[in-house]
Amino acid sequence: MFPRVRPNKYMRRQTKRLLRHTTMGSLPLIDPLLVLIAHYSSTLLLLLVLCVVAIVGIFVLRDVNTTNVEAQKMYVGSVLGLHRIGELQYQAQETRRATFYALTTNDSNLQVEYADQSRGAERLVNEGIVEYLRQARMPQEIETGKRLQMDWSDFLNVRDEVLASILEGSTKEAVNLDQAGGLQSFDRVRQDLDEIKRLYNEQASQRLANVVASSRRFTIRLITVLALTLVFASASVWAIQRSKMLAAIQFAELQVEFVASVSHELRSPLAVISSAADNIADGLISGKDNLHKYGEIIRNHSRQITELVNQVLQFASTQDRRSRYVLRPLGVSQIIETVLDNASEQLRAAGFTVERQWEANLPCITGDLSALVQCLQNLIMNSVKYSGESRWIAIRARLVNLEDRGPEIQIAVQDHGIGIARSEMPHIFEPFYRSAAVIDAQIHGAGLGLSLAKNIAEAMGGKLSVVSELARGSTFTLHLPVAQSQEFEVTGAAFDAAPTNTK
Amino acid sequence: MLRRAGPLCILSGAGFMAMALSIAAGRPPRVPPDPPAGSEQNLAIVVHHSNPTENLSMAELRKIFLGERRHWPNGRRITLVMMEPGQPERAAVLGLIYQMSENDFNNHFLHGLFTGEVFVSPKTLATPLGVRKFIFNVPGAIGYVRASDVDESVKVIRIDERLPEDKGYRLHVPPRASK
């Protein structure tokens, strides 16, 4: 049997260690990343998908916009441009045609009307040329436009003379004038218009090529971005699956480790109890003193088993957030006295001297008496267990005013034991953690005492700190905030003191 | 006669001034409104803007209208523009310049063209607008319209140093029949 431990802060921390020793092969660069992914897997995936969708959206919008602009330019530049040139060509023809219509009649009124039509078409051509020059950007366009303007002006000069001759009645002179200059100048105008048309066609081809290129670019980008999205999504799924697999392996290994540790811790005292019971049952033990001695052995080992089972149960309950502490104002001396009373027999049996020191009139703290007693008792038993040859511990309490957190009570348990190596310090509050040196020294324990003490401290709104030096001893300090005056009126049932490490 | 023409000259002069001001202001020129029916108007002799002639004596004008002069001083061939028979403007010109009847006018040009004494065959147009447009298109053309029908497309020349709006101007035309 083992407690149903759910992955939590501790397990995530353990993941780092396990990643270094996992049997599925470690990836030194990727695995730390996987730890992060394991931490924030769904958030990261969502963020990743959002980023990719946003990037895809920006690319698509940009390319659609570019293609749209190119298409509009093509339409305006080519379709409207060609329409304008077509209109220019038509009106230029009309200018000349209306002039010659005047030749077909002797009626001066009709001739004037045709002259009017010619001038109306001329005005439209002039406006068209001005508009073309206004929109011309390329040097070749501007040059052609100016040439057209000049040639058109030359043609109009001849046209005016031809018109005048027609209206004067000099038909022959009009025809001669037209053949001498009008025809050539109009041909030049026509060539200029053809040149402009050719330029428009070239531009249209260029713009069409731009649209095609833009469209192709858009397609390639879209495919690339979608492929990248697929790769990212696959990588994310792989990473999340791997991180979850690692967590599952770590959880399984923890369970095995836990079962092995607890079994080992149970087997030793059980073997002693069983052996003692066998000896008594077989009548090998005689005499009151021997029986008393065996009874003591059985009682001590039974207590050891009970203590272990209690720790396991308490740890399991804190992990499942089932611990409900009854918080109430407590006097510091009351807590310490209770702890020392509970531990007095074991301390006396082990031959320990206990130095007690606390200030008078210390303010109350808010907490659960039995939980705090358990916490301090774990610290004392820890000191007893790791004191080595020393048989001295001290328990001290004092009031400290902190700038950031306000007043707090510090209860310190000090020993002159074997101390803790600096490299072990980050792990000593992890459940089931036992240093190699301790295991080698065959000091029994489940590795739960300090973890439990820390959980309780945090559940009471405080914390547990340690100062230690190898072979010089350790000092564990329980920090508890001073009770506020209004807290004296709050019932303990209102507090569901979930341990802060199980967020 | 002169006493009756005085106020008309003033009115015509004011009309030209308003037109000149509107051209200077960049607005389309406004043709002066027709004078009230029943009042006599002056007849303007108009030529192309490129024509350098500014003034003609009555004798020179008569010579030109009779077709006895072929070219302008700038060398341009003279083209005479007349309005159709029956128009009051034509009647006024026949009376004041040619001093002929319609038949005498026709005979003069038939005879003159045949004998070579006349160099110019007059062009006939139906409306004052047609006259203006003709003159606008033909640099050597000369014609006549009422002073109120003049616009910026043609140039009015002085006759005996007088413009139609000036006092003592001698070419008048009877009023149009009321519409």
Image (spheres, coloured by chain):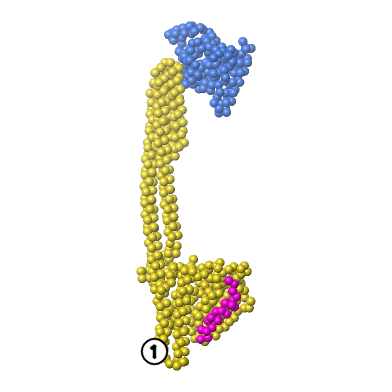
Chain colours: A yellow, B blue
Q: Which three-letter amino acid code belongs to the residue tagged 1?
A: Asp
Image position, residue B125 (x, y; %)? 47, 15
Q: How many discs appear?
A: 1
Give the letter of the chain under mark 1: A
> What residue is rendered at 59% in x and 21% in y?
B15
Instruction: Note whether residue A423 is visible.
Output: no
**Is A266 situated above or below A317?**
below
> What residue is rendered at 45% in x and 20% in y?
A113
| Majority secondary structure of magenta residues | helix
**Is A350 situated above or below B78?**
below
Image position, residue A294 (x, y; %)? 45, 88
Q: Residue furthest bottom?
A: A287
**Is A122 situated above or below A469?**
above
- Say which of A331 and A176 sits in front: A331
Instruction: Note whether residue B144 is visible.
Output: yes
> What residue is rendered at 50% in x and 19% in y?
B129
- Say which of A386 and B168 sits in front: A386
Q: Is residue A344 on the magenta stretch? A: yes
**Is A34 situated above or below A124?**
below
> What residue is rendered at 37% in x and 56% in y?
A230
- In magenta, the rendered stretch is A328-349
Q: Is residue A434 on the magenta stretch? A: no
Image position, residue A292 (x, y; %)? 47, 89
- Say which of A282 and A54 sits in front: A282
- Say which of A55 and B105 sits in front: A55
Image position, residue B56 (x, y; %)? 55, 15
Q: Residues within 10 Å of mark 1 (few under 14, many from 20)?
A: few
Quadrant of the rendering where the N terminus of chain A is positioned: bottom left
| Horizontal side, residue A307 vs residue A233: left or right | right
* Mark 1 residue element: loop
Identify the residue under disc 1.
A282
